[in-house]
Image (cartoon, grey):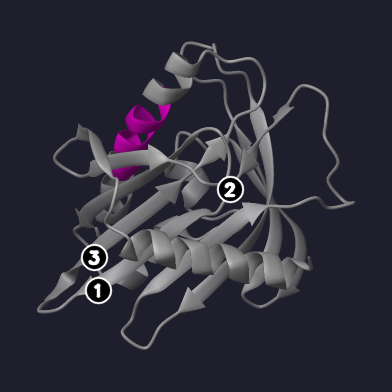
Amino acid sequence: MEYTELARCAADKLMSYSKDQSGWKLCKKTGEVAVYWRPSTEFTGNLYKGEGIVPAKPEQVWECLKPEPGGLRIKWDNNVEDFKLIDAVTDNLSVCRTVTPPAAMNIIAPRDFVDVVLIKHYEDGSITSNATNVEHPGCPPQRHFVRGFNHPCGCFCVPIPGEPEKTQLFSFFQTDLSGYLPKSVVESFFPYSMAHFYSNLTKAVKALKA
């Protein structure tokens, strides 16, 4: 499938995840986020959903989240070591490479991911990023990195009626880290990682507003 079709398919699946309330099990809860999981229908791992309120306008939250080279995301997100644009397909569709650092006390080695990313803006002010793994001739697997695969994943920045300084943020992760990792390590890593994602994002938007 072409990149456009793959991205649209990912966006449709993410929308279905956001509407389907069945089967979710709470696995972690903090002051910023509740993290849920259910078995993925895309691969043998799990689909994770984060739900939280971020104390900033949707456009401010998006400024911290948006996937762009040299953007704010690489500064606050501990799971993003490097981010590069591989191919700008359209204004709102691109192919990107993300590098992640070692994790879980170096049990998880550095990974890289190549994804097509579709940005969508809605009339109610919502902004979403929708991504899934692709192959691209400009970014073959590289030495020193395990190639991981993101199945449909992304973030939804949703305005809260009557609360202009707050944003409801939904995040969906279903990542095949590849390699030979114990299942217990993978299943404990993602809820922990998502909790830190929301905590660090909250700090980032407060710094942006300061």
Report whether 203 appears left or right of 38. Answer: left
Label for residue 151? Answer: 2
- Over which residues does the magenta segment extend? 189-198
Give the residue at mark 3.
167
What residue is shown at x 42% (from left), y 67% (from top)? 15
Tell whether position 192 is magenta.
Answer: yes
Q: Amino acid at mark 1?
A: Pro
| Image location of residue 49, percent across then percent down | 34, 47
Give the quarter of the figure containing the N terminus.
Answer: bottom right
| Image location of residue 13, percent across then percent down | 50, 62
Whether residue 61 is visible here, answered yes or no, is no
Helix, strand or loop at disc 2? loop
Sequence-first disc among 2 and 1: 2
Along the line of sight, which residue is nearer the eye, 153 or 160?
Answer: 153
What residue is shown at x 58% (from left), y 57% (from top)? 131
Along the line of sight, which residue is nearer the eye, 27 or 202?
Answer: 27
| Image location of residue 88, percent across then percent down | 74, 68
CB contact under 8 Å: marks 3 and 1? yes
Give the residue at mark 1.
159
Give the quarter of the figure containing the C terminus.
Answer: bottom left
| Image location of residue 53, percent across then percent down | 19, 56
Q: Main secondary structure of the magenta part?
A: helix
Q: Residues within 10 Å of mark 2 (few under 14, many from 20)?
A: many
Whether residue 133 is visible here, answered yes or no, is yes
Label for residue 26? Answer: none
Which is closer to the viewer, label 3 or label 2? 2
